[in-house]
Image (cartoon, rainbow, N blue to C red):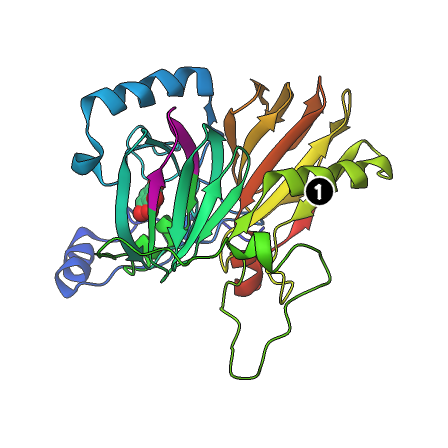
Amino acid sequence: MGQALGTLEELPQEYRDQLTAAGVAPLWPMMRNVLPHDAPMPITKPGFWRYDEARPLLMRAGELTPVEKAERRVLVLSDPGRGAGAMQATASIYLGLQLLLPGETAPNHVHTPSAARIVVEGEGGYTTVDGEKLPMEEGDGILTPGGEWHEHGHDGDEPVVWLDALDLPVFYYLEGSYAREGDLQSPRNRPDASQVEYLASGLAPTRKRSEAARRYPMVRYPWVRTQQALREMLRYAAHGFAELDYVNPETGADALPTIGFTAGMMAAGASVTPPMRSSSAAIHIISGRGKTTVNGETFTWGPKDTFSVPVFAEVSHQADEEAFLIKVHDRPLQEKLGYYEERD
Ligand code: GTQ
């Protein structure tokens, strides 16, 4: 363990004043704060956001604030460890519930952080990314990678709600977060690549050398296909639990550079105790009911609820009904930084 380190109080006041005046500070009294023994000391606390509670507040925002006054009409899910108003759910993951009403448009913009959306309810919403108009159906995953122009619109007649997940806290911390606004896009006269080019795994379009693939060739992951794939996998899964990662269909790499998406299915009655992980995560329930205990705190969840899992948390899930969920996590970022870890 090593011995207790010296404190600030042990140093003569005159010396401390000189340090302050010189703009320097001794490391040793603060060393364990920044390098705790064996595991990080997360500020993040497990959060639980019930959709039944959030939905009326979001609909009220629809009455109180026109989309023109909001650009993005979003209620941010704040980490309880940082308190109400915190612009993050974990150290690296921002989450927000966004509402678009029929006929509304959330204007075109581009920013350095990457975003992905999981569609929570409603029909007729769409996101246009780089000229590709992506229908938003319940459970769909829609990517708006950093640097790609995107806007949202709504052709239907009921409110549309989706969950935004962004790596905004990372970009903000790096002092790298900013946006540019632009004119509305003219969609290309073709359905999105998930409907045209990537209909089967193991198959990708043949291109001429002159037609370079986009960096993010597929930006919509239709839920119907994800769900079908999970159902097939679960038939052969040993413990009533199946998981699939969202990847770039051309490279197999994670769908976004920093944030990972994993869809999961639990059979009714299944319980799962994953290893402790260095990554943080948020889990959004697509359908089904069950319970999850995170560091001793139990969340009883149902459809459209969301909860968060801090780094190195002790977690166990129990499905009371067949359940489908999407996990948003920062494993891709941690792998790139070279420290992703699991402990049993
Ligand atoms: O839809 O582009 O929740 O730019 C936060 C920032 C959503 C968006 C958010 C954004 C967006």
Quadrant observed for ligand 1 in the rendered image:
top left
Which is nearer the eye, 322 or 306? 322
Please identify the quarter of the rendering in which residue 68 is found. Answer: top left
- Kindly identify which residue carries mark 1: 243
Q: Secondary structure at mark 1?
A: strand
Residue nearest the viewer, comparing 5 with 327:
327
Mark 1 within 8 Å of ligand 1, using the beta carbon? no
Decide: is 342 above or below 201.
above
Residue drawn at x 19%, y 61% as measured from the top left: 19
Q: Is residue 63 left or right of residue 340?
A: left
Q: Position of residue 283 (x, y in %)?
A: 55, 34
Quadrant location of the C terminus in the rendered image: top right
Is residue 202 in sight in this rendering? Answer: yes
Location of residue 186 in the rendering, given as x and y in whole percent from the top left corner = 32, 56
**For residue 160: magenta?**
yes
Tell me: 231 left or right of 127: right
Mark 1: few, some, or many residues within 10 Å (few <14, many ≥20)? Answer: some
Range covered by the magenta-colored residues: 152-163
Check disc 1 and give the amino acid type.
Glu
What residue is at 47 percent from the left and 43 percent from the top? 135
> From the viewer's perspective, is 78 left or right of 335?
left
Between 55 and 149, the one nearer to me in the picture: 149
